[in-house]
Image: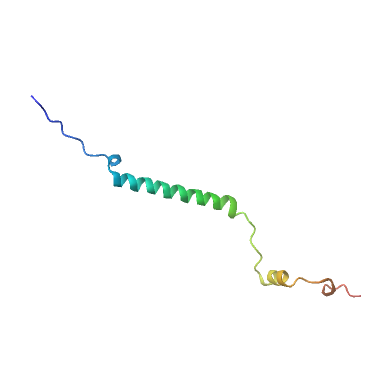
Amino acid sequence: MVVDIPTKGRRWRDKPLKRLVFELSVIVVAKLAVLMLIWYVAIRPLPRADVSPAGVSRALAPASASTQGNQP
């Protein structure tokens, strides 16, 4: 007597499209995490430029010694 054993449904790991979507989403999340880590470690701590009007005028036209008030 031969009894047919019902086959189990395919697991998500056996389905190539779902596995591909899973792997790609893991790669995207990992890359975003690495970019965020680079941002918080290397880029964010840098000092910001002084963009106030006074700071821009000091950068573009620094005061010379004759205009600083060293006159007698």
> Number of labelled discs?
0
Q: In the rendering, at what x and y percent does residue 41 appear?
A: 58, 50
**Residue found 27% across the figure and 43% down from its top:** 15
Q: Residue furthest left?
A: 1
Left or right placement of residue 30 versus residue 14 in this view: right
Q: How is the image coloured?
A: rainbow
Left or right placement of residue 71 versus residue 51 in this view: right
Q: Quadrant of residue 57?
A: bottom right
Q: Is residue 37 above or below residue 10?
A: below
Q: In the rendering, at what x and y percent does residue 24 appear?
A: 38, 48
Q: In the rendering, at what x and y percent does residue 17 appear?
A: 29, 47
Q: Quadrant of the C terminus?
A: bottom right
Left or right placement of residue 8 versus residue 33 in this view: left
Q: Is residue 8 above or below residue 68?
A: above
**Residue found 55% across the figure and 50% down from its top:** 38
Q: Residue furthest top?
A: 1
Q: Quadrant of the N terminus?
A: top left
Left or right placement of residue 13 versus residue 58 in this view: left
**Residue found 28% across the figure and 41% down from its top:** 12
**Residue found 29% across the figure and 44% down from its top:** 16
Q: In the rendering, at what x and y percent does residue 11 appear?
A: 26, 39
Q: Quadrant of residue 69?
A: bottom right
Q: Residue furthest right?
A: 72
